[in-house]
Each structure stands twice: as C-alpha cells, then as structure tokens.
Amino acid sequence: MASQSSESLAYVPYHLLNDKPNIIVDGSGNEYTRLTLSHWPGNETPSQFKADLSAEIVFNFLDSGEIPDGVNAVSNNHFDEDGLISMYSLINPEDAQEMREFLIDVARAGDFGKCDDRDAARVSFVVNAWTDPDRSPLNRTMFSGTHEQLDATLYEELLVRLPNIINRLGSFEEFWKADDAFMDLTEDSCDKGLIEIEEDKENDLAIVVIPDGGIHGQGRPPSHSKSWISTLCHPMVIHNRISCHRVLVVQQRKYQFYYRYESWVDYQSQPILPRVDLTDFAARLNELERGGTRWKFSGVDDIIGRLSMSERTDSKISPLQFVDLLKSALCSPTAAGKGV
C-alpha cells in the first residue's frame, strides 16, 4: 500500500491548485505536479504503474507506490468516469480495494464503452447523467459557468455519493434504465442475427451492419444519444463483442467509421495499430459523391476520431465499394499513420 496515510489526501479543483504540490489522476498535470497516474498520451506515469485505464494505474500505485512527501492535493483537468473512479480510489484506498474489480469495470464502461458487469455499466450511466444538463440532478445553473467550475462541482458531489450509487443502484434507475433497455434490445438483435458483425483482424476493423429498418422492440434509443451510431445500436454491446479498435457501421447507404478510445490513450495490454489520418480520404469520398453527401474526418487527435457523412442524404457509394475504399485508405503506404 502507498506509505503515506490516504487521510491526508484531498481533492482540489484543478483551476484552484495554484502552486500546491499535487498528484494528477487520469489527465495531465501542471508544473507543480509531483506524481502523474494517467493513461493520457504523453503522460509521465512511472512505468511500473502503467495500465490501460487510469483507475488500474491508481490501483497499481496503491499496491506498491509511495505518496510524495508534502503532497496533499489530488486533482484532474477534466471530469469523466475513469477520472472519478481514479480520484475516489486514491482518496479512499481501503474502501476502493474491497470493490477493486468492479470500480475498474465502471471506469472501463465509461472510457472504453465496454464492461464485464452490467451493474458497472449502470453506474457509469448514472455518472454520465450528472454531466448532462437535461438529465442531471444538479441545478441547471451549474451548467452556465465555466468547464472548470462544472468539473469541480461534479467531483465534489460525486466523490461522496459514489458508494451510495453503487450500493443502492436500483434507487437511481431513472438515470440508467433507458441505456439498459437499449443494451438489451441491441443484445437481442445481435443474438438473432439482425445486427451482423464481421471482424477483419488484419486491419483491426470491425464492420457492423444494421438492418435496413433498424432494430425493433420495447427498447428505444435513449433520448440523450449524441451520435448517429448510438441511435442505431448501443455501442457498448458492440464493443463487448469485438476485439477490433476500428469500427465501421453500415445501414443501407449510410456509413460512419470511428477509432475507438483505446487507440487514443497509452494502451498497455496489447499493441494497437496507429490511427491513420483520413482527411485526404474524406476529400476523395467527396469527389466520388459528385455533389451529394459530404464527408468529414474529425482528426486523429480527437478522442474518438470519426469519419462521418451528412445524415440527411444517402451515399452514392455502394457498401461493398465503401468497405474496399476504407480498407485501402487504412493500409495505404502513403497514408499518415499517427500513434497519439
């Protein structure tokens, strides 16, 4: 266990750190950071603690690390599930160790959109709901300030509430039931073959084909779905069923491709093919569309880099042709691959 008592560690909002010596979890530090426990690209995490998730890194540190002398502040430059779990575990190590694997699974559900335990996914859905002004229990005025102020409020509120959310998950059903039902529907659609999944391991590419009429049943896409893909199927179900880190979703002549978050972070458990910059490929697609739908690529440095098309119009490119074009772009020797 870390040698210094955890009781001396406390969360301090990132923008209020000033010159305090600090430990940073999950994000990037400042000039006064004495220890970084993060999976972000370019991190300064000691090699002996490195892991796929920041939460795993924190637990590795708790097993054998030492808190730097004179450090009492713990912080993060952003709020998300992995950051919350990392922060909670470092400040409350004894309680966290008792549910270590579950907490790591919550972080995995939040960051990588995959899980072993459905309850871990449900906890991540509750935490995510707090960040949405339309669903959050927080007063809506909390969302009118700066990102730094909102992050601080979320950490201050959820660090103390996390154990209760985990232990009384049923009491928070209103925040997870929509996602949960859509996961059930997506699982059922995969089991019945309505959603078809093919993996090309050589190109690290999963191709997910959604039926023309979509998937039907009692479950419906959550109203807070932010991407076209998440209105068609629940990405967590897909990620639980694939090993590839590049994903193409196809429905008739609509397509969207994305790089999973695992390929953005400093991933440790397996090598991942570097991201390929698809900016020129998007321009090539626009030429092939001949004035129809428009394509754009969000960039290799985007946390989830997406190649997407206008949602209102169909592509002029057939599914088979699009797959061939994409595979060529991903393995082209002239394409600029980037490990971010």
Image (cartoon, helix red, strand yellow):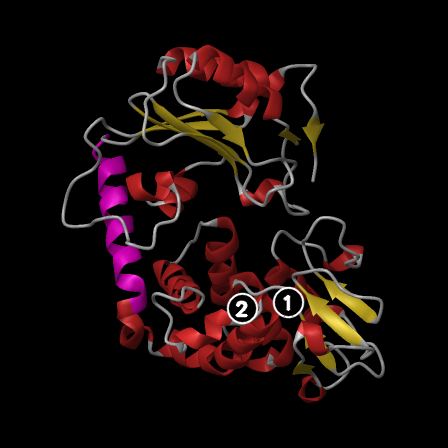
Q: Position of residue 35 (x, y in %)?
A: 79, 68
Q: Amino acid at mark 2?
A: Arg
Q: In the shown orientation, is residue 68 left or right of residue 277?
A: right
Q: Nearer the viewer, residue 109 or 95?
A: 109
User: Is residue 189 shown in magenta?
Assistant: yes
**Is the Cβ of the residue at disc 2 closer than 8 Å to that at disc 1?**
yes
Disc 2 to disc 1, C-alpha distance: 8 Å
Q: Amino acid at mark 1?
A: Phe
Instruction: Give the quadrant of the N terminus.
Output: bottom right
Q: For numbered disc 2, what is the local secondary structure?
A: helix
Residue for point 39% across, 65% down: 129
How packed mark 2 is, by other alpha carbons closer than 10 Å (few <14, some 14-19, many 20 or more), is some
The magenta stretch is 175-193
Q: Is residue 204 visible?
A: yes
Seen in the picture, residue 36 relative to 292 is either above or below; the reply is below
Residue for point 24% across, 28% down: 211
Q: In the shown orientation, is residue 25 left or right of residue 47?
A: left
Q: Residue furthest front?
A: 291
Q: Position of residue 297 (x, y in %)?
A: 55, 31
**Location of residue 63 by image quarter:** bottom right
Q: For numbered disc 1, what is the local secondary structure?
A: helix
The residue carrying mark 1 is: 59
The residue carrying mark 2 is: 100
Seen in the picture, residue 175 relative to 114 is either above or below; the reply is below
Instruction: Report the disc number at residue 32.
Output: none
Residue for point 57% across, 66% down: 147
